[in-house]
Image (tube, grey):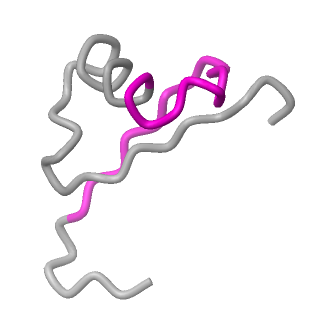
Amino acid sequence: MFFPEARIRVQVYGCPVDMRQSFDGLIALTRHALREDPVSGQLFVFFNRRS
């Protein structure tokens, strides 16, 4: 991927996440566990139990 600003931050959540939560559950997890704004332009990475 090409990021022209080179200021993209990637936040990785290290605990396994149930991916059946859909977008609403992942947004809530981003707000409460990572304490970040999900629409800030950052990238958020979540892993399931097998990864």
In magenta segment, residue 21: yes
Where 38 falls versus 14 (above or below)?
below
Among all residues in the image, which is located at the extreme top?
32
Among all residues in the image, which is located at the extreme right?
50
Q: Position of residue 51 (x, y in %)?
A: 80, 36
The quarter of the displayed image where residue 32 is located:
top left
Q: Quadrant of the N terminus?
A: bottom left
Where 3 falls versus 38 (above or below)?
below
Relative placement, left or right, of 25 versus 4 is right
2 or 38, nearer to the observer: 38
Q: Residue at x 72, y 30 (%)?
A: 48
Please provide the residue range marked out in magenta.
8-25
Q: Residue at x 35, y 53 (%)?
A: 43
Q: Residue at x 23, y 39 (%)?
A: 38
Q: Residue at x 34, y 13 (%)?
A: 33
Q: Position of residue 31 (x, y in %)?
A: 24, 21
Relative placement, left or right, of 15 versus 11 is right
Relative placement, left or right, of 18 versus 51 is left
